[in-house]
Amino acid sequence: MTEAGLQHYLDLAERFQAERAAGAPAWLRALRQDGIAQLARQGFPTTKLEDWKYTNVAPISGQAFSPVRTVHEAGVEAAVARLALPGPGPRLVFVDGWYVRELSRLDGAPVGLTVRSLREALQDGESLEAVVGHRARAEASAFTALNAALLEEGALVRVAPGTVCPEPVQLLFLARGDNHVALASPRVVVQAGENSELTLVESYVGAAPGVSFTNAVTEVVLGAGARLTHLKLQAESETAFHIGSLHVEQGRDSRFASHLISLGGALARNEVHSAFAAEGGECTLQGLYVGHGTQHLDNWTNLDHAHPRCTSRELYKGVLDDNARGTFHGKVLVRPDAQQTDARQANRNLLLSEAAMADARPQLEILADDVKCAHGATVGRLDEQALFYLRSRGIPRAEAESLLTHAFTTEVVGAVPLASLRDQVEELLARKLPGVKEGWA
Amino acid sequence: MKPLLSIKDLHVRVAGREVLKGIDLELMPGEVHAIMGPNGSGKSTLSQVLSGRETYEVTKGEVLFDGGDLLSLQPEARAHAGIFMAFQYPVEIPGVGNLHFLRTALNARRRTQGKEELDAMDFLQLAREKSKLVQLDQAFMQRSVNEGFSGGEKKRNEIFQMAVLEPRLAILDETDSGLDIDALRIVSGGINALRSPERSMLVITHYQRLLEYVVPDKVSVLAGGRIVRTGGRELALELEKKGYAWLGQGAGGKEARP
């Protein structure tokens, strides 16, 4: 990381703040200003920081990524048709971080569900002061700070109490690629009212190969008894950069499930910060990261058991080939009051080449005494016995390896509770892990 | 008639220790030949070497299958040539569907034979028919390979696979181990149904019990890495009565090694 790199982003944010100041409410100006201040104070993280030990962000901070105002281009429409999930339900489409109304689908939302562009909501004067920046704190990370400093566009998803949404909501973030060295800073804000139910899909994909940087922040607040399933597909081109953080606050007896599929990017980091804000919540965090070439896929989770009788289940699996590196850092904090916590965490890594690397760092801090906590982490290669068994039946070695590799991924892919996304992921995996015949699942 | 399998002076080392010390054995087409022996005599090593396990080092001797060199072939090529081993400990493979696995295996072999591959529907038909041989429930075929199967179900699954793949040589490695009497009957019934003049079987077992159901043409006793005696079915009965010690020097397994 060079100073010039940080300065570029600070200048960018200052200009942005000045241009947008007129018409912006005071709280939003303050939030952006705080983002600038935090970014200036922290600088971009270095590998000397514990939380960034394995991930060097110099390739991002050293490049002058800037917001690129999108124009409607041929090709984008086709990419949306190709990459959007089939099926009904509201869909917002963003190109290089900008909301594109013509490509979005706003009908199909049941009464009680609001899905709209965050920028439009702010322009309409929706009261979002208590919501935006509530969970995602700029002081937590330079990238969250940068997102706050450039905060303008994204999505607002509100589910009224008791509303059950039968169809998933999809947010499709498309990087145009080609020569657009674009910085996208979407902010997604989700409010799930008491006893509401929703499935939300965030897809980050590329229309064409290219170098882009997506710095996304999602904030979720679940009311008492709410159920939210959050599905994220992070599959941009392998020259793109992606830093994304998901911040969740769970109300009493709420259920939250996050399923992350991380396939794209030269460097990608997906963070999940989940906190129980009341008793009786359930949280499931699942992730699959599949890297090849020189991809670097960083997974970072932080589960805060702050209240009693909450349950968390965490499973992250990684497949790394060639010179790819995958990291998993899983923090679980069980605070003194969080009695009868039931927390389980597992991280499994499969290395397909000599040079591939995986770092597994479970980090449990347990301060209550009446709890059930378990964790396990493995880094290994394909099971030789299973390989021999398959070959002894006549399946050639390469095909057997591919069968076993896919079998390793099915635990996480199979748990994705949305068939259309599962199909898409399986198709992407079949392309990424070669030698696979149709119908391997 | 030429032998289907011909093992000549086979010496095999495992982790630096010589386990097989000169095996000679011939198996004619359609012949069922039982290999008996105490624990540690080299029975399982023999079956693993024949199926192509790479952790075994052949230091001397040769194995001809249908007149061609077997030992230079990869495990998958041996399967394509018509060799099938029923594992003593079938491997659980979570995430790989039993049917998909078996169709992949069958089609891989059919490709090498220049035959058209079976599609999912045709294969399902075939699998249903073959599964009746060992009374394997449809539900098992849909599950992951051997995952959560009981000992008996795993062995039935092995014989089911054999029925689908139709090998020329089946090596049954301690197929009777871990089976209760009902499962043993079912598994033996499946094996017997697959006996034919074109299919030879090498039945490796510690106990005579399986041979009451699958009656062999010949019985050889392996002890201390060598075949110490070959005879008819009566040899198995004699062993059952007298134990392996009766065969004397070199036959007592580990204890008898010099």
Image (spheres, rainbow, N blue to C red):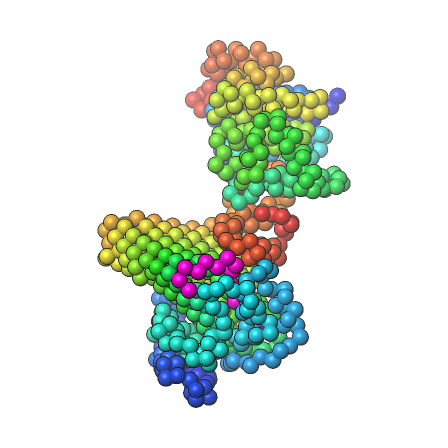
Image spot of residue A164 (x, y percent): 45, 58
Residue drawn at x 50%, y 57% is A166
Image spot of residue A155 (x, y percent): 48, 71
Q: Nearer the viewer, residue B22 or A229?
A: A229
Viewer can see residue A419:
yes
Left or right? Give the position of B227 relative to A39: right
Image spot of residue A432 (x, y percent): 59, 58
Q: Reply above or below: B72 against A21.
A: above
> Image quadrant of residue A276?
bottom left
Number of callouts: 0
Q: Reply above or below: A2 against B195.
A: below
Q: Main secondary structure of the magenta part?
A: loop
Image spot of residue B251 (x, y percent): 49, 19
Residue drawn at x 53%, y 34% is B90
The extreme front residue here reads A111
Magenta-colored stretch includes residue A164: yes
Q: Nearer the viewer, residue A21 or A378?
A: A21
Check the picture and name the quadrant holding the N terminus of chain A: bottom left
Residue drawn at x 52%, y 36% is B146
Magenta-colored stretch includes residue A313: no
> What span is colored magenta in the figure?
A160-177
Viewer can see residue A366:
no
Q: Nearer the viewer, residue A24 or A405?
A: A24
Q: Reply above or below: B248 against A219.
A: above
> Image quadrant of residue A248?
bottom left
Residue drawn at x 69%, y 22% is B196
